[in-house]
Amino acid sequence: MGILQRRFYRSGVRTVRDINDTKHPTIPPTYRTKNGIHFRKLMWGFDGHWHGFTFNPSLKKMKDYPENGYAPIGRELDLSKYYYELGYFALTFTEGYCRHAGWGRHVTDKGETAGFQTN
């Protein structure tokens, strides 16, 4: 297991959206893989409760998928809290590979502040 693999073993989500296509703040520094791919950690507690889990385009490790699926845990916001409480964090590539097509059509989830509405 390489140094980056050990350091980021508890990363649960790697978002593939362009870093400028999300309002979720990142935390310095920027890391670099051996292949030259740059990425950053997403901040825990964004907007008071988002910790990085998303159903938006992302990469997730199958071994971190709950045995009974996501439904018993809850919705996206519940899953964000679930993985946060397990010590997981999310990463984002500094160069995105897709853009969010749902800006302005966000549905406020239970427990989420209505002020989260996007562009």
Image (cartoon, grey):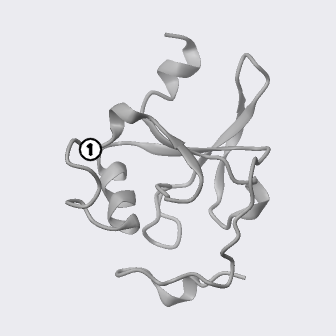
Q: Can you identify the residue that label 1 sits on? A: 66
Question: Of 67 and 27, which appears nearest the observer?
Answer: 67
Looking at this view, name the residue that lies furthest to the top. 1
Q: Quadrant of residue 118?
A: bottom right
Q: Position of residue 58 (x, y in %)?
A: 57, 48
The residue at the point 69 percent across, 38 percent down is: 39
Task: Look at label 1 and name its amino acid.
Answer: Pro
The residue at the point 67 percent across, 84 percent down is: 104
Q: Is residue 30 left or right of residue 57?
A: right
How many numbered marks appear?
A: 1
Q: Position of residue 54 (x, y in %)?
A: 50, 58
Give neighbour class at mark 1: few <14, some 14-19, many 20+ (Cα, 10 Å): few
Q: Position of residue 101 (x, y in %)?
A: 70, 70
Vertical arrangement, residue 31 with respect to residue 81, above or below: above
Q: Position of residue 19 (x, y in %)?
A: 74, 54
Question: Of 6 and 98, which appears nearest the observer?
Answer: 98
Q: Is residue 56 left or right of residue 28?
A: left
Q: Is residue 45 left or right of residue 75?
A: right
Vertical arrangement, residue 81 with respect to residue 117, above or below: above
Vertical arrangement, residue 65 with respect to residue 43, above or below: above
> Can you say which quadrant of the picture contains the C terminus?
bottom right
Q: Secondary structure at mark 1?
A: loop
